[in-house]
Image: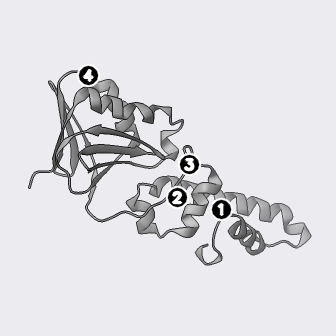
Amino acid sequence: MTIRLDVPTAALVHALTPLAILKSPTNIGDALIGYQAGHLRIELGGVAGTAKAEGNWPGEARVSPDFVLSLAARLAPQGRAVLLIEDGKLVVRAGTATIQKSCVWETSARPSIALPMNPSLQDLVRVALIFTPPEIERVGLKEPVKSAKGEMEALLAKAAQTLEPLGVTIAEIRELVKAKCGPAEAL
């Protein structure tokens, strides 16, 4: 079975346009490309764009944000584009251009993790506290959450060092962070 979508190139470029408002592609996770009810859907960092499409796309492709954000500039707006999954890669063919990038293909349902555009450190730590690592990876947030956890640990260590003369421990500071960011059993 071929995993393939056919979409007017102008519609694909239009679907990518809302994603350009994102400030920091390094803090937003992977892009998710899916298909539902006759529409291609591209999600990135809490923003989504859609375009009418036809084909067989029984899951989602997870690709780097840089690839998706640069895609519109690399496509001529006339004609049709074909999106394919081949050998672990998302392949986009439009006119004479063939653009490809490694991807992760998912057929399982993904959890719903709602984040604002350009999430804060607190938003990302909350995700780490509430969701399991496989759920976080499934929605493309593994790297931003990992980075947020590292930043949190550095801040905890700095706060503990500062407050140590007052008898405050890192465990007490961690409990405060848990209370502010998520459920107690998660950290």
Under tag 1, what secondary structure? helix
Residue holding disc 3: 116
Count of numbered marks: 4
- Mark nearest the camera among 2 and 4 is 4
Percent position (x, y) of residue 159?
A: 78, 61
Per the rendering, the mark at residue 77 is 4
Amino acid at circle 4: Pro
- Mark nearest the camera among 3 and 1 is 3
Above-or-below relation of 32 to 93? below
Asked if disc 3 and disc 4 are in contact, CB closer than 8 Å, the reply is no
- Mark nearest the camera among 3 and 2 is 3
Q: Mark 1 or mark 2, which has the lower sequence index?
A: 2
Under tag 2, what secondary structure? helix
Q: How far is mark 1 from mark 2, CA to CA?
A: 11 Å
Q: How far is mark 2 from mark 4, CA to CA?
A: 37 Å
Amino acid at circle 1: Glu
Q: Mark 2 or mark 4, which has the lower sequence index?
A: 4
The residue at the point 53 percent across, 38 percent down is 24
Q: Mark 3 or mark 4, which has the lower sequence index?
A: 4
Q: How far is mark 3 from mark 4, CA to CA?
A: 30 Å
Q: How far is mark 4 from mark 1, CA to CA?
A: 46 Å
